[in-house]
Image (spheres, rainbow, N blue to C red):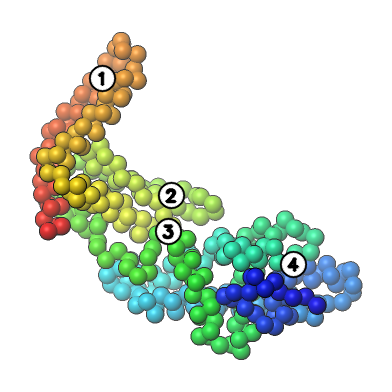
């Protein structure tokens, strides 16, 4: 008789009914191969129905987890129910669920007949994880509280894996608003916010670049609003960290200027040393850029004054 490996019986894998577990890890393909070979059906059937049940359970428990933590709330990026639904769609995807399945060794346990390549198929693994959630729920006599506790660690893993959101404290400081206050008070301060989307590992990643004078700040993530806030936070943190080093406004400005000069000097060192027409043009452009930087010294000074006031 089949016996579950003791070392993996933890969390949602603590299923006492072996037939329920076998059903959860058995694909329809495996059952069809068995029928063709023996002219009999599996006693425990395949995992199709469990997959549907597991999907519904996951969506409910995900939503329930956020509501228990106080969401939606106005001082976060999750201000309304629609935001929770959007977050659920982003996090409960095949890629993340497949990672959970692998973390529980389901890629080794799943029954896929002769198609061993399916053990690395994201959809197959994600479906297997959903089926295991449903089989656990049924094994515990449809006890929702027990299922909630068992799946809590997995949900926290999904949030951590997203890398973009902490449920305990979602952006209480509005860094974007703070930045715009600085810009309003320093209207001549040159700045630019660039945005693009890039597909990475079958997921859309949002990339933001904030340029202030010549200094660039970058952020990327799964969630557009959160990532945008992160790029403004990186600017805020940069200035704040310099101040924590007990640098005066003049020292901070000087360090920024020195950074700019080092970049310009590096550009000059990379040249041949003899300026032709095109080289002279590049040199003039660098000089013009440096002059522009010095011209904005007053704006930077005002900006840092505002930062100091915010942190007092």
Task: Out of 185 and 143, give the one closest to the viewer.
Answer: 143
**Marked residue nearer the N-terminal end (3 or 2):** 3
Quarter in which the C terminus is drawn = bottom left
Q: Is residue 213 left or right of residue 83?
A: left
Q: Quadrant of the N terminus?
A: bottom right
Q: Which mark lies nearer to you, 4 or 2?
A: 4
Residues under numbered marks 4 and 2 in contact, where contact means CB atoms less than 8 Å apart: no
Nearer to us: label 3 or label 2: 3
- Residue at left 79%, top 71%? 31
Q: Earlier in the sequence, mark 4 or mark 1?
A: 4
Look at mark 2 in the image and give the residue it sits on. 197
What residue is shown with label 3? 163
Check disc 2 and report its element: helix, strand or loop. strand
Labels 3 and 2 touching (C-beta < 8 A)? no
Residue 220 is situated, as x and y percent measured from the top left of the image, at 40, 51
Q: Name the secondary structure under disc 4.
A: loop
Residue 11 in picture, x, y percent from top left: 57, 75
Res 283 label: 1
Task: Give the SS element for disc 3.
Answer: loop
- State how far apart marks 3 and 2 are (Cα): 17 Å
247, above or below 109, in the image: above
> Do callouts 1 and 2 mark residues in contact (Cβ within 8 Å)?
no
Label 3 – label 1 distance at C-alpha: 42 Å
Disc 4 or 2, which lies upstream in sequence? 4
Q: Residue at x 49, y 78 (%)?
A: 61
Q: CA distance from mark 4 to mark 1?
A: 66 Å
User: Residue at label 4?
Assistant: 111
The label nearer to you, 1 versus 2, is 1
Mark with earlier residue (1, 2): 2
In the rendered structure, which disc, 4 or 3, sits on the residue that comes first in sequence? 4
């Amino acid at each position: 008789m089949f016996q579950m490996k003791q070392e993996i019986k933890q969390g949602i894998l603590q299923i006492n009914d072996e037939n329920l577990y076998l059903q959860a890890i058995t694909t329809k393909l495996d059952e069809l191969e068995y029928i063709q070979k023996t002219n009999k059906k599996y006693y425990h059937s395949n995992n199709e129905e469990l997959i549907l049940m597991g999907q519904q359970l996951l969506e409910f428990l995900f939503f329930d987890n956020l509501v228990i933590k106080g969401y939606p709330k106005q001082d976060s990026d999750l201000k309304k129910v629609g935001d929770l639904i959007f977050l659920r769609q982003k996090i409960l995807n095949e890629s993340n669920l497949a990672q959970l399945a692998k973390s529980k060794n389901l890629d080794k346990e799943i029954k896929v007949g002769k198609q061993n390549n399916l053990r690395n198929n994201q959809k197959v693994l994600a479906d297997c994880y959903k089926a295991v959630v449903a089989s656990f729920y049924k094994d515990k006599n449809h006890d929702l509280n027990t299922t909630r506790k068992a799946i809590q660690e997995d949900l926290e893993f999904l949030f951590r894996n997203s890398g973009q959101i902490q449920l305990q404290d979602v952006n209480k400081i509005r860094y974007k608003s703070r930045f715009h206050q600085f810009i309003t008070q320093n209207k001549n301060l040159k700045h630019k916010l660039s945005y693009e989307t890039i597909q990475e590992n079958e997921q859309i990643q949002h990339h933001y670049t904030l340029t202030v004078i010549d200094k660039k700040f970058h952020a990327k993530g799964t969630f557009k609003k959160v990532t945008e806030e992160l790029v403004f936070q990186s600017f805020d943190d940069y200035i704040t960290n310099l101040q924590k080093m007990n640098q005066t406004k003049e020292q901070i400005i000087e360090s920024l200027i020195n950074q700019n000069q080092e970049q310009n000097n590096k550009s000059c060192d990379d040249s041949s040393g003899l300026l032709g027409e095109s080289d002279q043009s590049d040199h003039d452009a660098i000089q013009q850029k440096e002059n522009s930087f010095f011209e904005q010294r007053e704006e930077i000074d005002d900006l840092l004054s505002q930062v100091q006031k915010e942190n007092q």
